[in-house]
């Protein structure tokens, strides 16, 4: 990349539109390197939808009336619960474009994803927030009841937390399918539930990466707060979304999108290379990968006039 090299002015053969697509970790790091700065910008856009959360702390400090303070915090929490789903849909729409290597106008596509999926994504986002609060409460309440009343209270705690984990894994798929297909909310939930079970390897890998990143961010928060404060607005959400898309979108292609086109005797257009996408006669030919390398001439020192 030119930004990290002093050879940015050196010519090369270019990149062919029909160049074979990399696979596995080579593809992951290739996409991550090319989209690194775009991921930062995307993370900033996603952060805008966390403004209700950011306002909770000032509301708690500045509003002296306890009831009024809790009321404002409650309203902000409800607003966040309804808008975080559409924000995630916008995030996943752009990340899906990154994965299939389709050009994206990041801000426009992000907000298009928010608007196009607002209703369905709001429902999913609200359910996610409700289950998150329920899971947290279960870890606080049921162990105390189990210690003082009966060990049987561990059972509802395990059930609640298991449901939360299952729904979180379903989220790996539901927002990607929402932006890639025209499925109804019922179909999205059913398919994401199925894929959360079928693609166990991809799911466990994604969960492991999420835990690792959250652990790293926790260490930074407790020990190097300046680095944490620098990274939180530009890094974790988009990176984790990128990992999720990279691991899980191929599963959606295999089990949801590809069968749709196979039934119609067609090829999934996401697999088409650049030249296959354009059937009409082109006015200009793309010479990427065919251009001759032009060697840089050695720089001569200029004459000094005395």
Image (tube, helix red, strand yellow):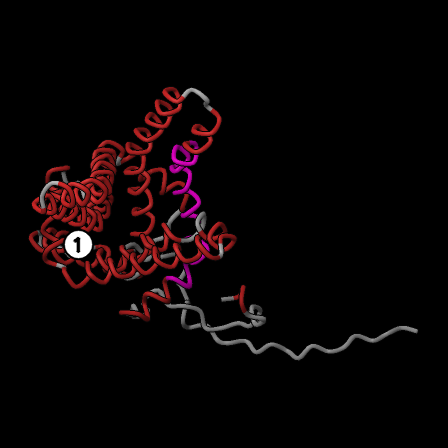
- Camera-nearest residue between 39 and 277: 39
Please say whether residue 17 is one of the residues in the magenta stretch: no
**Residue in the foreground of this view, choosing between 229 and 87:** 229
For the question of whether residue 100 can be seen, the reply is no
Q: Quadrant of residue 108?
A: top left
Q: Residues within 10 Å of mark 1 (few under 14, many from 20)?
A: many
Judge by depth and name the residue closer to the eye, 252 or 141.
Answer: 141
Is residue 56 at all visible to an observer of this figure? yes
Q: Which residue is found at the position 29% from the left and 60% from the top?
A: 209
**In the rendered view, does 153 fall on the left or right side of 115?**
left
Measured as percent of width and height from the top left, residue 26 is found at 33, 71
On the image, numbered disc 1 is attached to which residue?
A: 252
Asked if the magenta segment contains residue 41, the reply would be: yes
Outermost residue to the right? 306
Q: Which residues are magenta?
A: 32-55
Image position, residue 306 (x, y; %): 93, 73
Residue 275 horizontal/vertical position (percent): 30, 61
Q: Is residue 51 left or right of residue 3?
A: left
The image quarter in which residue 8 lies: bottom right
């Amino acid at each position: 990349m030119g930004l990290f090299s002093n050879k940015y002015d050196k010519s090369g053969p270019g990149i062919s539109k029909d160049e074979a697509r990399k696979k596995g970790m080579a593809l992951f790091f290739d996409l991550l390197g090319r989209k690194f700065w775009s991921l930062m910008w995307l993370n900033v856009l996603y952060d805008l939808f966390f403004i209700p959360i950011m306002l909770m702390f000032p509301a708690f400090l500045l509003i002296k009336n306890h009831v009024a303070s809790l009321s404002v915090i409650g309203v902000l929490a409800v607003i966040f619960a309804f808008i975080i789903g559409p924000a995630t849909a916008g995030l996943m729409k752009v990340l899906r474009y990154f994965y299939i290597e389709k050009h994206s106008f990041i801000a426009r596509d992000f907000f298009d994803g928010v608007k196009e999926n607002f209703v369905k994504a709001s429902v999913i986002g609200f359910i996610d927030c409700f289950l998150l609060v329920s899971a947290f409460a279960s870890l606080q309440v049921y162990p105390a009841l189990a210690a003082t009343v009966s060990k049987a209270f561990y059972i509802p705690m395990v059930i609640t937390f298991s449901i939360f984990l299952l729904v979180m894994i379903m989220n790996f798929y539901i927002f990607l399918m929402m932006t890639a297909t025209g499925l109804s909310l019922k179909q999205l939930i059913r398919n994401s539930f199925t894929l959360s079970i079928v693609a166990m390897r991809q799911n466990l890998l994604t969960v492991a990466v999420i835990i690792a990143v959250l652990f790293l961010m926790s260490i930074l928060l407790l020990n190097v707060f300046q680095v944490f404060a620098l990274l939180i607005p530009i890094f974790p959400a988009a990176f984790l979304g990128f990992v999720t898309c990279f691991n899980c979108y191929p599963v959606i292609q295999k089990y949801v999108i590809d069968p749709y086109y196979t039934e119609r005797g067609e090829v999934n257009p996401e697999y088409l290379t650049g030249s296959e996408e354009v059937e009409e006669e082109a006015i200009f030919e793309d010479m990427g990968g065919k251009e001759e390398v032009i060697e840089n001439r050695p720089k001569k020192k200029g004459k000094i006039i005395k």
